[in-house]
Image: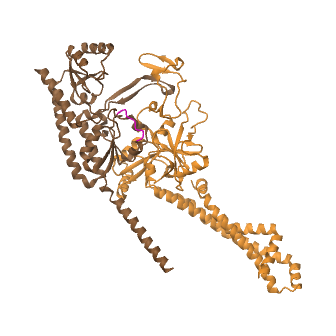
Amino acid sequence: MKKSLNVLLILSLILSACENANKKQKATNPDQKLKVFTVNYPLYYFAERIGDEFIDLIYPIPNDVDPAYWVPTQSLEDIQSCDIILANGADYAKWMGKVSLPSAKVVNTSEAFTESFIKIEEGSTHSHGASGEHVHYGYAFTTWLDFKIALGQAEAIKDAFIEKLPKHKAAISENFDELKSELTELDKSMVSIGNELQGQTLFASHPVYQYLAQAYGLDIISEHWEPGEMPDDKQWDDFKHNLDHNVSNFMLWEGEPGQDIKNSLKSLDITTIVFVPCSNKPKASNFMEIMRENVKNMMAVISADMK
Amino acid sequence: MKQSLYLAYCYLVYHRFRSLVLVTAIGLIIFLPIGLEKLISDSEKEMMARAEAFPLIIGAKGSSTDLVINAIYFQQQEMEQLNMEVGKQLDKTNLGHSIPLLTIFKSRNFPIIGTSIDYFEFRKLEIAEGKNLQLVGECIIGSSVSEQLNLSPGDSLVSSPENYFDMAGVYPLKMKIVGVLKASGSADDKAVFTDLKTNWIIMGLGHGHQDVVDLKDPTLVMQSDSSNVRTTAKLFMYNEIDGENMDSFHFHGDTDSYPVSAFIFVSNNEKSSTILRGRFVSGELPDQVVVPVKVVEHLLQSIFRIKYIFNTVFVLVGVATLLILVLIVTLSLRLRKDEIHTMFTMGSSRHKTFEILGLELLILVFLSTVVAGILYLITGYFVDDFIRYFIL
């Protein structure tokens, strides 16, 4: 009897020791890496730069898909389990409005800039039932092309990380400051480009440069052209019609257009400028390098035009 | 002794109807005060446990009791709604985070609770079968709902229409059951959980329909020009959300203005909780904040005052029953005068005779106690109904 009592006592001691160890492990959570999901590549890049070794980034979006139109299927459970879900805001990634996410963990990185959001019509006016005539509105969403908004988004990420990892505040702030100076530099360059282009109209292959135009005072008319696809006759006619009413020498492209397109544009005295929005992970390089390249491309073309 | 016990048993079996009436009467008298005490104390414990699990509730100004009953016990009350913007304001305080609750609709008499998946983490509710909510149009059911309606993941539930006479009103939504919660012994077992957005779709604030620009059937178009397409009432509105029509679902207007019945506020710490309450008291934040424990304590105090009246009644009834029992025994002895005389004549001693009679009484009391014990055990199953019908 005494022997079995002793065994019971030892067992209970071991169990309580295990329980205490478990509790201690839970209490030391601040040392664990934060599991972070980002809805697009610019946020991924900011998070990677700011969070550095303190975070584990989840990015299940394939390279060949536009993150704005990607829909999670298998990965939703993984996203739900993240400590922080970084949303772009401005209606980016509409799937976020159709899934169940832990709202306490979702950080809308552009929330401070809702006043600057650009409203756009989606679809035609229609009416059904008792709701009367209506048109659905949305927002232009490539917010990071306004580098001041991009900086604000990075700051929101920094704040979210510091809130979860107060112990690493100094390192996170230092990482952010570095990114801040680089984004500020980009912003300054774009401001001077904007000044150079005052009074000029630019064409764009796609309606993705709304925030670039708004932030740097650019007058941009958007087409719906693909870099690897020659526009059809109607598209060319519409473009020429637009050109008759808006004198322009430049056209912004999301990617390098085909040589035939370039030649056709050249014949109309239009120079192509590649300005990659970089919404998804590039095969090589990174967000900052691509944005610097974008700015350099614009600078080069403008300087050549001046001469 | 054994023989006396046998004779007492035979007597009670012979007069089985009288014995049964006596056992039932005495059993009930023993049970009533202890049973009521159990109902009251268990209800109190259950209600307080639920209230203690909810730190702060924020709702529209009005009855704090209605707010708490609605938000934590899911007993749907007619009350003013807040909007989603309030939740954003609460989150901006950085004192904690809010969890929305929309508790307007029902499905087969079980409340549909629109919330975010934070609720399950906050309540530490685990999925027994299936998976967590992922897409709008899905629902998770409590264990009692699953048991009573015999439903499991893969089945579906339809929301009840708000008004059966409103034929042109909001279409009921067929929700796909994706999970069943583990039993928690609380109101969560008897609820259907959906994402808040699903509830807004049930409300008609969001909907999905055929693409009005790409309609093939001319009978669907009432009028069409370059700027507008007007459709007929024949336009198909989806009443179920699936992978194919998911994209067509959309909300009209700003979702921040959409209704929410209440917010659970999970504060960072006690200090944050006090600061937030202070902001409501000072009027910096509109609406009202309540501490569920205090509201429930107040509610129970008012209701359980009646317990003392019941206790007094039971003591008086008990004394009366005891007196009746004494009377029954006395009258019974008088009626059994000849029988007792026969026992004496047969050689039974006075002691033996009273032993038999005493054992008869003892068996009756014992059986009554057993009856009271069984009733006491059964009482535990009626705590929820007692709370629902007599307290909430």
Which residue shows up at 32% across the image and 59% down it?
A28
What is the drawing colour of chain A?
brown
Is B326 contained in the magenta span?
no
| Picture coordinates of residue B307, whole percent (x, y) | 60, 64
Which residue shows up at 33% across the image and 50% down it?
B94
Q: Is residue B134 visible?
A: yes
Scheme by which the image is coloured: by chain
Which residue shows up at 35% across the image and 63% down it?
A24
Residue B24 vs residue B265: left or right? right
| Picture coordinates of residue A221, whole percent (x, y) | 27, 21
- Closer to the camera in the image, A259 or B89: A259
Residue A229 vs residue B376: left or right? left
- Closer to the camera in the image, A216 or B6: B6
Tally of marks? 0
The orange one among the chains is B
> Which range of residues does the magenta coloring cover?
A68-74
| Picture coordinates of residue B35, whole percent (x, y) | 63, 65
Residue A297 vs residue A136: left or right? left
Taking A94 as reference, is B326 above or below it? below
State the image quarter where residue B340 is shown. Answer: bottom right
Which quadrant, please, contains the C terminus of chain A?
top left
| Picture coordinates of residue B158, whole percent (x, y) | 57, 39
Which residue is the extreme one toward the left?
A307
Residue B224 vs residue A115: left or right? right
Predominant secondary structure in magenta? loop
